[in-house]
Image (cartoon, helix red, strand yellow):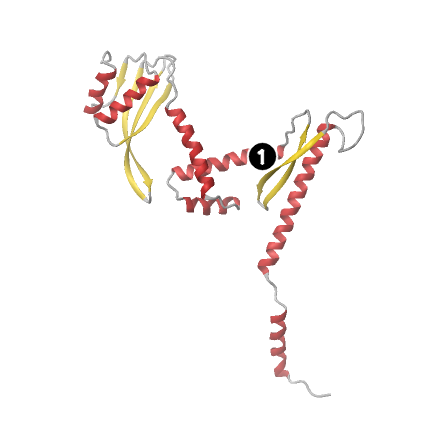
Amino acid sequence: MEPTNQGERPQEVAKLSQVIQIDEGKIQEHLGEVVRSTVEETLNAMLEAEADRLCRAERYERTEARKDTRAGSYQRHLQTKAGEVTLKVPKLRNLPFETAIIERYRRRESSVEEALVEMYLAGVSVRRVEDITEALWGTRVSPSTVSELNQKIYAQIESWRNRAIEGNHPYVFLDGLWLKRSWGGEVRNVSLLVAIGVNEEGFREVLAVAEGSKEDKASWTAFLRHLKERGLKGVRLFVSDKCLGLVESLGEFYPEIR
């Protein structure tokens, strides 16, 4: 037997290490998929069990105790810590199918939407919103999703701003506030005109908020006209500072108030 050259052993080990390589990234990806699929399978099994409980019978089971029958299912995506799973939500012919899983999804979806809107309105860029959502929920929200949510909240804001003012408001406080707004990567000062009314029951209510280029007569005229058109009435006293533009505009729309 020929003697073994000890100097060659490290080279052989090095060659073997190149042949047998462990890709930790792929292993983690595989394990993550195993966990995700397990969560998906478990949740769907829970939904099936819930449907059986409501029907008081398993699928295709013939029994006098049966209260309802299946009418197919629909898919719904749910974000979990293990990743996105697809739920096959059963549909029943007569009974409504309600489950804690779906309710939890609705609450989470609502909280996520609120967080997205708050971040955007606070001046956080769309790219930054994507990064934050991926870090918090493991899901990267697309710019189109942020845009859709913004359109939804802007529609709600416009509905609130144009709502009819009901009842009398004997006392109305008017003021202009200067706030900082982030827009296009720049921070600018903007003027907000605010009206707070006190109704006949003594409760305060924010009647209107509008952005004005500045606290001049034109801005206050447009603001008061909008209040008048929405039905502000029964005012006995306006409380405000001595802004000249405001004082002049009040005389046009509420000349009887001093």
What quarter of the picture does the C terminus occupy?
A: top left
Which residue is denoted by mark 1 in the rendering? 104
- Using residue 83 as the reference point, say whether residue 158 is left or right of it: left
Compared to residue 19, the image places residue 136 above or below, namely above
Identify the image quadrant of residue 251.
Answer: top left
Above or below: residue 166 compared with residue 151: above
Q: Is residue 243 visible?
A: no
Residue 231 in percent (x, y) is at: 34, 16
* Image quadrant where residue 174 sits: top left
Q: Nearer the viewer, residue 171 or 209?
A: 209
Tell me what residue is drawn at x 76 percent, y 30 percent. Answer: 57
Q: Residues within 10 Å of mark 1 (few under 14, many from 20)?
A: few
Residue drawn 39% across and 37% down? 121
Q: Is residue 211 above or below residue 42?
A: above
Residue at left offset 62%, top offset 47%: 36
Q: Nearer the viewer, residue 203 or 169?
A: 169
Helix, strand or loop at mark 1: helix
User: Which residue appears at 42% of the width and 28% of the height?
Assistant: 156
The outermost residue toward the front is 72
Quadrant assignment for the N terminus:
bottom right
